[in-house]
Amino acid sequence: MNKLINIGNDNLSIDNEIFTGDNFEDFLRSLPPMSQEEVLRIKKSTISILSKCVAPKFKEPSYDKNTGLVIGYIQSGKTMSFTSLIALASDNGYKIVIVLAGTTTILLNQTIDRLTEDLSNKNEYVIIPESGMDKVSKISNILKNEVRERIIILPILKQWQHIEKLNELFISNKIKPLLSRLGVLIIDDEADQASLNGLARRNYKLSKKKKISDIVNDDEKNVSEYTTTYNRISTLKELLPNHSYIQYTATPQANLLLDQRDILRPTWCEILEPGNKYTGGLRFFNNKKDLIIEIDKENVKDVEEPEMPESLRHAYRFFLLESAILSYDYKGIKRIKDKVEMTSMMLHADRLIQVNDIYLRWLKNYNNNIYIDLKSKEYEVLQRFKEIYNELKINLKDYFEDYPKFEQVLEKILYYVLEEIEFWFVAGKNDNEVKWKRFSHHVLIGGQKLDRGFTVKNLIVTYMPRTTKSKSNADTIEQRCRFFGYKKDYIEACKVYLPQESINEFEEYVDFEKKLRSYLKTYTIDEFYDNGRLMNFGLLNPTSLNKIPGELIKNNFRNFNYFQPDFENRVHNDNIIINFLKGLKRVGVLQPTNDLKNSSDNKHILFESKIEQIKKILKKIKFNSSREQVSKLQFLSILDELDHNKKAWVIQIANERDKNGGRPRSLKIDGRIKSLASNYPPYFGDRDLMINTKDLFNFNQLYNNEPIIQIHKIKILPNEAYPANLKKLSGTSINVIATVMPNKNTSTSFISVNYD
């Protein structure tokens, strides 16, 4: 029986009446055991997503499209969410759902298996993988069949050749006439991978070149270019007059940084909440870090005869012991926690196949040696196992009423675990599918194929020595977190081996993810765009620079920074600054301890203020330059993280020079100031005022790591080399705002993109 759910939203072009019928309810009942609260959460999010999509059917030929972004956590159930969406779509009359199911056959088969298992009613669902012209008659007949109305699910590889075949199907005379009255759902799984235009930055840089003579590469003389998969997706969207393109990902940075003209730029957003048993970054990278074991960086490829690291031996012993404890019963000992029927270890060493092959050989040889050593009761080997056993006896004490003896656990390793282990090399061109049901314990070794979208079942030990020489991309390193997932029942048994560099990067991403999700839950995606798309990163780039159609702007404001002057808003901004200074409490005059001939240049008025006052004035200051707008938003966000009632200092620089128009300064050819701060005398430079300088009246002793705002009045020097637009600025006086945020005040860095 259908139930009508109304999700009101005046911005949508449909009436938003969503029916929860038998198919959706059957799907919810088929879910693994979970609380009523979790089921309601899935139900609510699915209804919310579908309510934002185009209508399933139209009485007249129509043209209605939108793009949405659905953000989950790594390994948290995004596939469950879009499967739930398909079930609800079938209740509401949708006829076609396309699923772009990853870039490898492993991921495609993984998705098809899930869809086939969860949507098994053949009277309601038709799953047709890798569709092309050979399926046109079948699909046409299903669409026209009014007796047996079924929803068609088309999972395909996210590769341009496969999308092109699908496009040919929609161009066909049998399908095309039906599309003008049908709403189609396109689900893009891992939507920040392969789908986006990898030439976006190249196109942006080309657009900034003013003359054809500036372009040295003949290929660049074409206008915008697009990666092939993006191009085919664009064609697919053009062929479907009514559709919603729904992007699923756990790492949405690239999608959120798309130019407003990009056809894949999301216009709405949904944040998925994980189930109660999910353990992600907040658990693994909390203050305790009890699940993380630090290892040294490993450089195998540059060593002639590399030796197996002791840390890898330790990780493998850990895996064997935990597998024996988690997966087997012990005679006469009552188990408190349920057994984990299967366990896995993942080794993610390098992107190079030959390096991963070295690790595979190491582990296989070590596995054989362990069997021999345990059989012969080699004392040194037994002691190393005993050390880990004693640690596990403490950490996993709640798994049994009486903990198994060491000899009993070794017996399980020798006669059960070692006989049930299989090694899988998930690397290279071949898609080596893991046969999970054939063995009880699995060891997976590989590189990129063990990244995005790949599910490692019951993963308890992860060994990842891989680091990058240059700055890492946040989405790339986060997608390696296959150790996240629904592990609450045995989370104490999970261990992740990482170099300190990687630990720092993961910690930064977890903090960023928490703030981004909180913002997008509170505000609309349009408000995120309007707020400069700020992202907190210091160690990491948000994504591959190739995907960013603009200039990456990064600020941490820990040292001296200043906003470039805006001459078009000069009068407005100067009035704001003058009135601001009049309302402040004057403390005194900062001047050096030694008398100087040019003392007027080194006398500055010190004012006391509050962070809240600083924020108010900055919000009133106007910048036409999008770069300065972004920098202002970044600085305001830094201040937002501080106590609004906290003290701040304002310094009016060289105020005695104001009567002559200010300090003389030159401009660069692009209109930016060549250099603002004075460093004379060296012990009393502008950049270090109050922080690292002594002044005549010891005002520096009042300073306690508060933010500092400096007001510099400057006068533009004439220069015959200036272009005409700058020559007219000669002699103009203008106030410039500089900022100083000491290291102790904030560890935050903000990244934004300037698209101009």
Image (cartoon, rainbow, N blue to C red):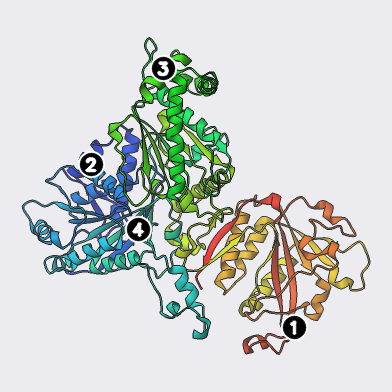
Tell which circle, 3 or 1, labels the residue nearer the N-terminal end.
3
Q: Could you tell me the amino acid type at mark 3?
A: Glu
Which residue in the protein does label 3 denote? 411
Q: Horizontally, is 648 left or right of 242 in the view?
A: right
Q: Position of residue 162 (x, y in %)?
A: 25, 60
Element on which disc 3 rests: helix
Q: Could you tell me the amino acid type at mark 2?
A: Asp
At a point 24% along the width and 51% down the height, the residue shown is: 18
Which residue in the protein does label 1 denote? 717
Is residue 185 something one can see in this rendering? Answer: yes
Tell which circle, 4 or 1, labels the residue nearer the N-terminal end.
4
Q: Nearer the viewer, mark 4 or mark 3?
A: 3
Q: Could you tell me the amino acid type at mark 1?
A: Leu
Which residue in the protein does label 4 denote? 68
Q: Nearer the viewer, mark 4 or mark 2?
A: 2
Q: Nearer the viewer, mark 2 or mark 3?
A: 3
Which residue occupies the foreground of this view, 10 or 473? 473
> How far apart, in angstroms, are the residues tagged by discs 2 and 1?
73 Å
Tell which circle, 4 or 3, labels the residue nearer the N-terminal end.
4
State which quarter of the image contains the N terminus. Answer: top left
Mark 3: few, some, or many residues within 10 Å (few <14, many ≥20)?
some
Q: Position of residue 309 (x, y in %)?
A: 54, 36
Mark 4: few, some, or many residues within 10 Å (few <14, many ≥20)?
many
Tell which circle, 2 or 3, labels the residue nearer the N-terminal end.
2
Which residue in the protein does label 2 denote? 118
